[in-house]
Image: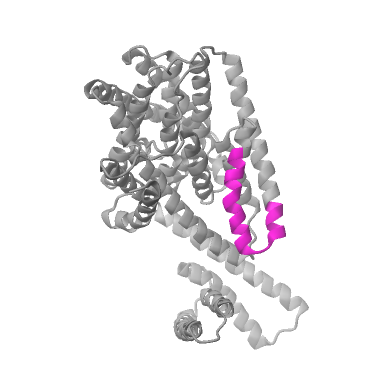
Amino acid sequence: MDQLALLFVMLLGAVLSVPLGDRLGLPSPVLMTLLGIVLAVLDFVPNVDIPPELILPALLPPLLYAAVRRTSWRQFTANKRPIFLLAVALVFVTTAVVAVVAHAIVPGLPIAAAVALGALVAPPDPVAATAVAGKLGLPRRLVSILEGEGLFNDVTAIVLYHVAIAAAVSGTFSLPSAALDFLLSAVVAVAMGFGLGWGTNRLMDYLGDPTLQIGLTLIVPYASYVLAEELHGSGVLAVLTTALFLAEYANDADDVMTRLAGHTFWDIVDTLVTGVAFGLIGLELHNAIRTASGRWQEMLGWAAAIVGVVVFVRLAYLLPATWLTKRLHAKRDHDEDIPTSWRETVVMWWAGMRGVASVALALAIPLETDSGAPFPDRDEMVFIAFGVIMATLVVQGLSLPWLVRKLGVRADTDREQEFEKALALRAAKAAKRRLREIEEVEELPDELSEQLLRRAFDIGFRISPDMGEDERREGHEHRVRRIKRVRRIQGEMLSAARHEVLAARSEAGADPEVVDRVLRHLDVRSLR
């Protein structure tokens, strides 16, 4: 098997792991990691030959962009305190504690290298958080915090990692210089992200065509990451800023085709890249096995100690941090999403899985220092990092669904239904408002006006049938049955039309492009 065949196997596994995970009740990213582990121990499967410096730029931008599409800037600002406590403060705390313990138990490990180890194992993976926690039926407030933590903690951890690696390689460290680098990295990233987001939004209007617009959204995350890194900014923060800007300002309510196609396209990208990323984690087991050759007992002991530190620190930090957030929330009138019980706090603790970023940072540890000497204890750092990744991702990822069920943590479906009902009512009222505005400038027959008024109500009712409890419902059930019958018959008619047009594609003299254009019109009509 060569590298290309291995890539195809991973892509196929990414597709198949989704329905398999649904049937087994397990997260598909964890299944892909297990697949990678299985492939890693097979003799005929080659070692993955990807330069470490390309792993983050190749995998993180599309994954971050896809994750941000599911959230909003308002959601981040509403949860700024809990996200800051998790994404910034907890990363610093975890890095410090891991550095102290690693420096104490690994003979000869310099403090700078220990800090680098702490930084690369500190951030829970943003992809794992969204892909795993988002499918367990958790309360939206927990998913929001986990998403925010996962998206922003890489920024802190990667900057800390680079500062520590630079100190280990050069042998010198300056706290003021490191703090300034941290600040400049954030400023450059935010400026680049906003600038590229604004430019992309303008370019979207110029392109017009949905295919070109969606193609541009695939290029933009990579451009944002690479340009920010070239200017010594944080590529991760730049991608987040660009994606949040576009999510806020690049949505045209009437651009139906771009929105539908864009959602489908990014769902596909998210599924495939997530699968490959987590499969790569399992495949990198080769490196860990080779590193520990002849020293299994000693290195497994170190890895187990750091795993215990990472897991314990998260719990020990979350308990007081959650209490503090609740106190601040109670004193101020903020619409924050916070855990409301110890059960939700436990789920947040156990959902702190490490993943793609930790793998990339571990593999990117330099081989040599500036003096030409081997990087101190590099093999030990790589093995410990993979021990933390495997333990948190596989053990916690496989047991998280069980823990969620055992603790009875579930989404507040009543609240979601009420919000959906409110949105449906707003949509119906907006349609009625627009109808009145049209009636003021156009003379409509009474029969047509009444028919359009019923359709305005139907707009909201089809979104949320419960909305009818607050509106006039006389005769509505009859109209709904009639509409369903009409839609069913119309669907069968459109199906017959599509079959007939598709059959014409194989006829002699038929122009496939014309056939596909007609078929596309019928497909769009079927969505209405």
Residue reaching furthest to the right: 441
Whether 302 is among the magenta residues is: no
Task: Tell me if residue 253 comes above or below residue 222 in the rendering.
Answer: below
Tell whether 295 sits left or right of 428.
left
* Residue at 64% over, 72% down: 432
362 and 252: which is toward the camera: 362
Please tell me which residue lies in front, 268 or 249: 268
What x and y, as percent, mark residue 311?
Answer: 33, 29
Please state the extent of the stretch shown in magenta in the rendering: 201-226
Above or below for 231 versus 264 = above
The x and y percentages for residue 113 are 43, 18
Q: Main secondary structure of the magenta part?
A: helix
Residue 88 shows in the view: yes
Q: Position of residue 320 (x, y in %)?
A: 41, 27
- Residue at 30 percent across and 25 percent down: it is 303
* Residue 225 lies in the magenta stretch: yes
The answer to whether residue 337 of the structure is visible from this angle is no
Q: Nearer the viewer, residue 125 or 277?
A: 277
Q: Quadrant of residue 41?
A: top left
Residue 110 position, x and y percent, is: 42, 13
> Image quadrant for the C terminus?
bottom right
